[in-house]
Amino acid sequence: MKEREDDRVEPTTVIQYIDGQWRNPRQPEWFESVNPANGETVAVCAVSPEGDVEESIAAAKNAFRRWRRVPAPQRATYLWKVAEILEARKPDLARMMTLEMGKVLAESLAEVDTVIASCRYMAGEGRRMFGDTLPSGMDNRTIMTVREPIGVVACITPWNFPLSLAAYKLFAALVAGNTVVWKPSSEVAVCAKLFTEVFEESGLPPGVLNLVLGSGARVGNLLARHPDVRAIAFTGSTEVGKGLAEMAGRTLKRVSLELGGKNAVLVLADADLDKAAAGIVQSAFATSGQRCTAAGRVIVEASVQEELERRIVQLTEKLTVGYGLDPKVQMGPLANAKQFSTVSRYVLTAKDEGGRVLFGGHPVSVEGFEEGFFYAPTVITNVQRHHRIAREEVFGPVLAILTARDFDEAVEINNETQYGLSTAVYTNNLHYANRAARECESGLVYINSGTSNAEMGAAFGGFKDSGNGHREVSYHAFDVMTEWKTIYTSY
Ligand code: NAD
């Protein structure tokens, strides 16, 4: 499809938002946000210098003194307004998401819906910030525990879900009474600007939410080191998360990490293979496989492998790769050149190690979008447990198929990567469904659906190197965002 005139964008400028003001950086330095489908510049964005990052932290610290005293149900009223504004701005937000990181418009719209649902869910939590009352062992005494906010929270977020992954952190932090400095991924700076404007329009007091921009290595590290930042809420790669936790440990910050995955779909011999194939293809190739919960592996019992592979390929070949704003397209480009070369390299390695490509395995040329980072949805079979493609996160549209002798071996293979985010199991056997739920070392287990469909209020997060034990999307986020205080009253 040739690009339509109205799909073109005039590059915009993105600057920092500190203490309720949109501010140019005090030392001018800029980077570009680029459309991965056509190489066009979407925005020119400021890099926040050290002094400005410090000011954003100071503004958040100052605002915390008042914000913490606003009753939680009143803090929630800002979120109710944010949800309304998001509804009104949904088309603009979704379109910009597709322009900046490539996912198809239907997925971008669905992401805004998720953000709205999350906003309303967290606003409701403002009325449910429960504590405990305990029986005292002494006469004339009461004991209660209450949740208190912790202070300035730094949120550091990736590009694959530009709004929702930030939303889970921001909403929980704010309703709990904390103030925030947000550093989004540079790939999606315009989305971050639009989201910040929504908070601004809601009337959120100055300093309660601040936006700083720039590379993780510079700006992210400043936040992780600063003694006035009391918590880091991070979603991104395992390597960066480990480094951040190490740095943050020096000032005893709390750190919540949502990290990588090498998620598997287990298909047992009795499974409904049509259902399994549909779930697998959706899990592997939605967002061009650039999801932490994307299915990178299928582990299938040998007796149904050939039949399952046939169905997976049949569905995969129907996917149209192209520009995310084209309604006929199901899979957009990869988000940037780095992603493109990582995916290409992994496919070559998989072939060198003995994998056999059943479908894809090559870049895709899209007419009118010759500069785009398009790659075919790729299915590779004959993958062995020790192959790199079986163990390492690709973060792209590459599905590796491994064979298991039986249920026990399927679970053993599932559990042998460093990660533990999401596992799906297709079976109609009650015994194996329950054993899989118990024995898979994953924070999320889906029986008879794909690896990625989180619902509001259900704890989200991973085991092992997929996280550090914290959860979000649910009230469990308050374990990071609040501190317990115990109050003894004698009378
Ligand atoms: P990334 O780790 O490169 O970057 C994530 C964020 O951290 C960005 O804002 C980046 O600027 C910042 N950053 C990078 N280096 C930093 C440093 N040294 N110090 C501080 N901040 C730094 O990840 P990405 O490429 O943006 O996203 C892909 C990764 O995120 C994948 O591994 C994916 O699995 C993971 N992810 C996990 C989840 C989850 O919920 N578990 C969700 C989405 C993505």
Image (cartoon, rainbow, N blue to C red):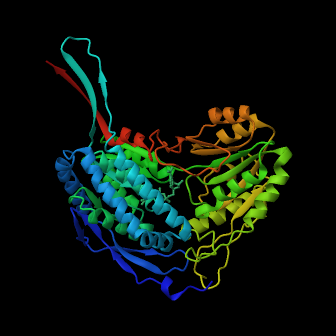
Q: Is residue 331 visible?
A: yes
- Name the residue at the bottom extreme: 5
Residue 106 image point, x, y percent: 55, 68
Q: What percent of the width, then of the height, locates residue 161?
A: 48, 60
Q: What percent of the width, then of the height, locates residue 314? A: 78, 63
| 480 versus 45 height, above or below | above
Q: Residue at x 26, y 50 (%)?
A: 75
Q: Nearer the viewer, residue 417 or 307?
A: 307
- Choose between 362 and 21: the one closer to the eye: 21
Q: Is residue 56 left or right of residue 418?
A: left
Q: Residue at x 27, y 42 (%)?
A: 150
Identify the image quadrant of residue 165.
Answer: bottom left
The image quadrant of residue 211 is bottom left
| Frontmost residue, 438 versus 345 | 438
Q: Quadrant of the N terminus?
A: bottom right
Which quarter of the rendered picture does the C terminus lie within?
Answer: top left
Q: Residue at x 85, y 53 (%)?
A: 306
The residue positioned 47% from the left and 60% from the top of the image is 113
Q: Visible in this render: residue 49?
A: no
Rendered location of residue 336, percent (x, y): 53, 70
- In this picture, residue 435 sits left or right of residue 464: right
